[in-house]
Image (tube, rainbow, N blue to C red):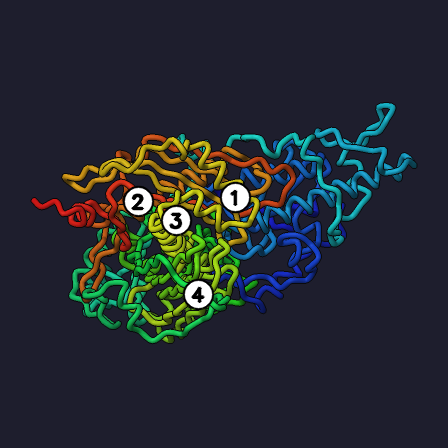
Amino acid sequence: MSVPALTRRDILAGSGLLVSFSFGARALGQLAGGGEGGAASAVKRPDLPGNLKSTPELDSWIHIGPDGQATVFSGKVELGQGIRTALLQVVSEELDLPPGKVTFITADTDLTPDEGLTAGSHSMQDGGAALANAGANVRMLLERSAAKAWDIPVEQVNTDGLGHVIAAGGRQMSYAALASGISLHVEAVPNAPRRDPARYRTMGRNLPRVDIPAKLIGEEAYVQDMRLPGMLHARVIRGPSYGTRLVSPKLDEARQMPGVVSIYQNGDFAAVVAEGEWQAVCAMRAAQASDYVRTLPHLPVDDGPRRLQKLAHREIQVLNTRDQAPPAVHRSQGVFSRPWYVHGSIGPSCAVALFKDGVLTIWSHSQGVFDMHRATAELVGLPPEKVRVIHSPGSGCYGQNGADDVTGEAGLLAVSLPGRPIRLQWMREQEFGWEPCGCGMVTKVDAAVGADRRIAYWNYEVWSNSHNMRPVKAGGYAVAQQIVPGFAPQVPKPIPMPEGDGDRNANPLYSFRNMDVRYHFVSEMPVRVSALRSLGAHLNIFTIESTLDDLARSIREDPLAFRLTHMEDARARAVIIHAAEKFGWSKRPKGDGRRGCGMAFARYKNIGAYCALAMEIEVERETGAVRVRRVVAAVDAGQPANPDGLKNQVEGGIIQSLSWAMFEELTYDESKRTSFDWGTYPIGRFADVPDEVEVHIMSRPGMPFLGAGETSQGPTSAALANAIADATGIRLRDMPLTSEKLKAAIGVTG
């Protein structure tokens, strides 16, 4: 990787086409909040689709160069989910240009629009919608320009997919020639004609992912691979996990070790900077040879996530449709939980920072480079315009792991050593010990079926911390409370519905009578927590879908029929039926003590993609081990930009969710986390991957994009629990559903 030399103005000034360019939304972005903890840009044009609402100027998104090449700017980042390819296809289609004629620039605070976080499955719904409509606007302007030049109605011109506007009689003009006569420094219009799905050339095709080749052949694909001339290496010196402090770190000893250039110390935060990476690691090990003390309340060893029910909370009424409930005939009650999860990123978090000529540049794999830009500026005491953050992919991202923290810490170190780039990488045990975990949660449900075989009432409660602690100011960094003077921690806040955080998907899409849904928002917890894929939707869908199966079983009704009885949404019904048909639900193996099948459904956040899923498992009763034989999923995400990429996302979500549900659990004693590596934090291995996984993408030509990145996590864990119940008759409610728990529930001893 090399340091980009060009600025946005350099790029745009190349052709002299534009009189100016637009970043008006960036300043306004500091005034607004939203998303999953990120500071969202203010809405300027609510009539426009996606993130055009906050950045309506076309030149903020697209530039046509003198060679006819398009340069496209996106604030969304590649996290391994393939979004770079999908967004490239979207804008190529609407510009009607081959993808090879589009230079795609992502998330750089000096170049791209502020699209907030790349999180919450918003990239296609908001970023894709913006690029599609910006592309359509630009193509419309080019066509109008050609029609005017030829003095014919615009309805008589078209584009050829190769960078020309064409008309009858063989007339054609290149985009390059046309662009030289127009300005893109105009706001988009909401009704620019989109390409006809029947004539798509790029969208809906399985374009090979552009991020894969470098990863496959070992090129510089990740920020962890980044090497700059004169670069130094750094490691932080810390206690074993968040909430601890070293009593007497041996900094003088580390300072004398070979290759050490500097020991940074500010309050309780210390780091070693060395010429070589191994030298930095050795010096860090020497400095950390110290006792530690816990600085926060003890971790909840005795009652795990159930501790949440005993803590002070704010009650939020999510839904209340109480009426005169009909008499209950069959009732289902239960308390469900999930533990704290770590993100389990393949590579520990890393950032590279350079402070030169008064400007701090940081390469970061954060999901929100604009938040990093603002928060780091405050942390290091620079004006925001003197801090530039450029996204560079990292090896593993499922929410707020250590990527944000390491960005701020690299900034501190770089400012202390101007002129030399510094690469800071956390150690594996620091990632496990200090990252914000996915929230432990508890749910409680009391529901019943009436004599008419429909849900008579549905009482539901969920307890959770905030899933929303991403740094939007300096106080959001872990280091901010270690340095002197420090910054006050960010105050935990719930994310309002329909996005929600702990209450995400707590409001069922099903048509139930007499619903009472409450969210107990717990603001304090000694475990550091923040966003992990799907947030609260994971446990809420697990609970809802488990309870539906139990109620269906209580009246001897098929789970598929019971769900359809309570589902009015036509697209949801179609997805459920499609998954059932592809799975062969009506001919499935019946639960016989060892084999069993389960199904589950959810629309992510009730505003994203629809996902229904059926699963066949086999239980080894003697050990409690569960083997997943087959998984069949159906997904409706609107118009798929890249169907294979969408399948990849759903398949990955299925594997991840199975690992959460069957194996994963953060362990700890009273003073520290005790999960420090893959030996102490179990995840699913290759041998645990299902024998077969089928993902069927519903055809929805031309329909709006629906976020699908996190749509399968909830239904997968729920279908697993339902399949176990079908096979054994045992309802497990506390994740992980380990073989030890199942064996004990079955009653096998020895």
490 above or below 9? Answer: below
Which callout, 4 or 3, points to the residue nearer the camera? 4
Instruction: Inspect the image, locate mark 3, and give the three-letter code of the amino acid beneath it.
Output: Met
Q: Residues under labels 4 and 3: Cα distance?
A: 54 Å
Q: Residues under labels 1 and 3: Cα distance?
A: 56 Å
Which residue is at a point 76% across and 53% down the rendered structure image?
A: 186
Q: Residues within 10 Å of mark 1 (few under 14, many from 20)?
A: some
Residue lying farthest to the front in this orientation: 451
Instruction: Inspect the image, locate mark 2, and give the three-letter code of the amino acid beneath it.
Output: Ser
Q: Nearer the viewer, residue 66 or 634?
A: 634
Element type where label 1 sits in the image: helix
Q: Residues within 10 Å of mark 3 (few under 14, many from 20)?
A: some
Residue 239 visible in the shown view: yes
Question: Which label belongs to residue 573?
Answer: 1
Element type where label 3 sits in the image: loop
Count the labels in the image: 4
Question: Which label belongs to residue 231?
Answer: 3
Residue 409 visible in the shown view: no
Q: Which residue is mark 4?
A: 517
Instruction: Inspect the image, locate mark 1, and give the three-letter code of the amino acid beneath it.
Output: Arg
Element type where label 4 sits in the image: strand
Which callout, 4 or 2, points to the residue nearer the camera? 4
Q: Which residue is mark 2?
A: 659
Q: Nearer the viewer, residue 299 or 739?
A: 739
Q: Nearer the viewer, residue 350 or 231?
A: 350
Q: List x then y, in percent, for residue 466.
A: 40, 65
Q: Residues under labels 4 and 1: Cα distance?
A: 23 Å
Which residue is at a point 42% across and 55% down the rendered structure image?
A: 537
Give the quadrant of the C terminus: top left
Q: Residues within 10 Å of mark 4 (few under 14, many from 20)?
A: many
Q: List x then y, in percent, for residue 9.
A: 66, 51
* Mark 2 / mark 3, whichever is N-terminal: 3
